[in-house]
Image (tube, grey):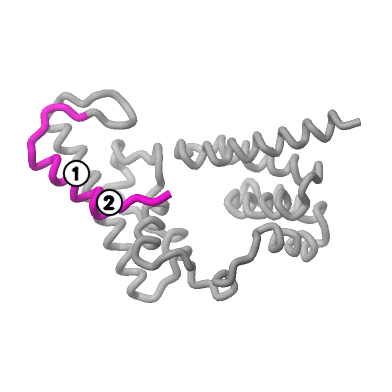
Amino acid sequence: IMRHVDEWAAALRDMSAKKPTVLLPMHGAAIVDESEVQSRLTILAEALEFVSEETVRRLNAGERKDAIAATFSWPERFANEPSLNPEYNRPEDISRMVAMRWTGWWDDVPGHFAALAFEEEAKEAVRLAGGIDALDKRARELLVSNPKMAARLADWAFFGAPGDPKALRLTIDVYMSRLAEPDMPVQEGLVYFDQAARARAQLEALKAAP
């Protein structure tokens, strides 16, 4: 997923300068109040510019891209703005777009530079954990307190123990739980739903096998 955030903000500024009286957003009803149109265009442009500038500042300070996104600080004026509700992308997702544009695909983790199939990493993670039972137990413990980490462990289980019923059930449970989180962006939620559906289909196929 990649968008040119600076150009996105500039386009919003250009639209605002033309003083439109109607705005047709991708999400939600048409906005026909001219002052509201200006407000929406301006606040979104400001928010995108903030993400871009803050991401570049932290990149120039030597921070890794994953650390920037994971700890991205959203100012209160944006966090409390209803029109910036993350229906589609979170601020940290946009930060990752900015970072990728200016720095490329590598995430600054040395071992990630050489191409390695995720399945290989996942199989080793399952082995190090002591098997799928241990990984399943830890992922379920983390699901309430750290759902992002629980999802990483579920991915290790799914890709590291392909076709294992316990790995498939864990994948379904973790990603259906994540789907129920408040303010889950649509795009992110679709990814989680797709993974849960894939695991469920595999589990049903196993049950139907003679």
Residue at the image position 87 percent from the left and 32 percent from the top:
209
Amino acid type at mark 1: Leu
**Nearer the observer, 192 or 76:** 192
**Nearer the observer, 51 or 10:** 10
Outermost residue toward the front? 115
Relative to residue 61, is residue 45 drawn left or right?
A: left
Picture coordinates of residue 19, whole percent (x, y)? 8, 35
Q: In which quarter of the image is residue 87?
A: top left
Identify the element where label 1 is drawn: helix
Residue at the image position 49 percent from the left and 37 percent from the top:
182
Picture coordinates of residue 175, whole percent (x, y)? 62, 41
Picture coordinates of residue 140, whole percent (x, y)? 71, 47
Q: Mark 1 points at which residue?
A: 12
Distance from disc 1 to disc 2, alpha carbons, whole Å, reads 10 Å
Q: 81 above or below 10?
A: above
Q: Quadrant of residue 185?
A: top left
Q: 163 above or below 201?
A: below
Relative to residue 150, is residue 32 drawn left or right?
A: left
Stretch in magenta: 1-23
Q: Mark 2 points at which residue?
A: 48
Amino acid type at mark 2: Leu
Residue at the image position 61 percent from the left and 55 percent from the top:
149
Placement of the C terminus among the 4 image quadrants: top right
Q: Which mark identifies residue 71?
A: none
Query: Does residue 141 appear in this view?
Result: no
Picture coordinates of residue 202, whole percent (x, y)? 75, 37
Q: Kindly indicate whether the residue at mark 2 contacts the one at mark 1 (C-beta within 8 angstroms).
A: yes
